[in-house]
Image (cartoon, helix red, strand yellow):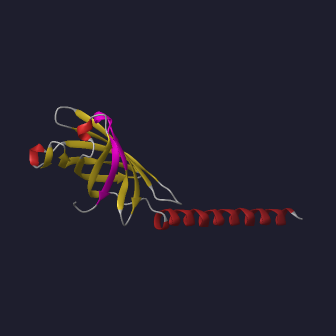
Amino acid sequence: MTTEQFWLNFLCSVLATVIGGGILTFLFFWLREMVFPLPNVTGRWYFEIHTVNSAYNPYKGMVLRYVAMLWREGNRIEGTVEKVYENSSTGEREYEGENRTRGLVVGYIEKKFFSKDRIVLHVVENGHGRESTNFYELKFSSKEGMTGCFNSMVAKQDGSVKWQRGEF
């Protein structure tokens, strides 16, 4: 093999590697953006939590409803929530205007390629009398919304939660 043939083979190999790498990069980018995109969680959501367990017995069986505004930056989620409804041992009530408690949402999306995407949210709510912390672990479905479980620092509550685009 002559020096000229060596350099010709070398340049052809480098060119083939660069073109192949470019095609693979485009293919992976297309798959990530078009076939396996992150879920669209941006916008208004309504969610309902059902308390199953609690250290404070009157909270067991309690149903709370919230409205949330979420936005996504990459896989990070931020937003706000307002409590709009409560059905507990003290009765059933809807909250309007200044009577609503507000909270801040921070979370992230864990992309799953072979199962439903996992969404983790941490909500700090400025409740009546004290601040409370709720933690949500959700599975995303484009048809059903988000479903999962929650844990709260208020009376060690936990239970199920359902998030949907329309009101309850």
**Looking at the image, is 96 positioned above or below residue 13?**
above
Q: Nearer the viewer, residue 9 or 84?
A: 84
Q: Is residue 118 visible?
A: yes
Q: Nearer the viewer, residue 76 or 25?
A: 76
- The answer to whether residue 119 is left or right of residue 165 is right
Q: Main secondary structure of the magenta part?
A: strand
Residue pictured at 77% horizontal, 62% vertical = 10
**Looking at the image, is 133 positioned above or below residue 117?**
above
Q: Please identify the quarter of the rendering in which residue 104 is found.
A: top left
- The answer to whether residue 154 is left or right of residue 35 is left
Q: Please identify the quarter of the rendering in which residue 99 is found.
A: top left
Which quadrant is the N terminus positioned in? bottom right
**Looking at the image, is 12 positioned above or below residue 120?**
below
Residue pictured at 79% horizontal, 62% vertical = 7
Q: Please identify the quarter of the rendering in which residue 57 is found.
A: top left
Magenta run includes residue 156: yes
- Highlighted magenta segment, given as a residue range: 149-164
Q: Nearer the viewer, residue 157 or 8?
A: 157
Residue 157 at what x, y percent from top left? 32, 39
Residue 148 at what x, y percent from top left? 38, 52
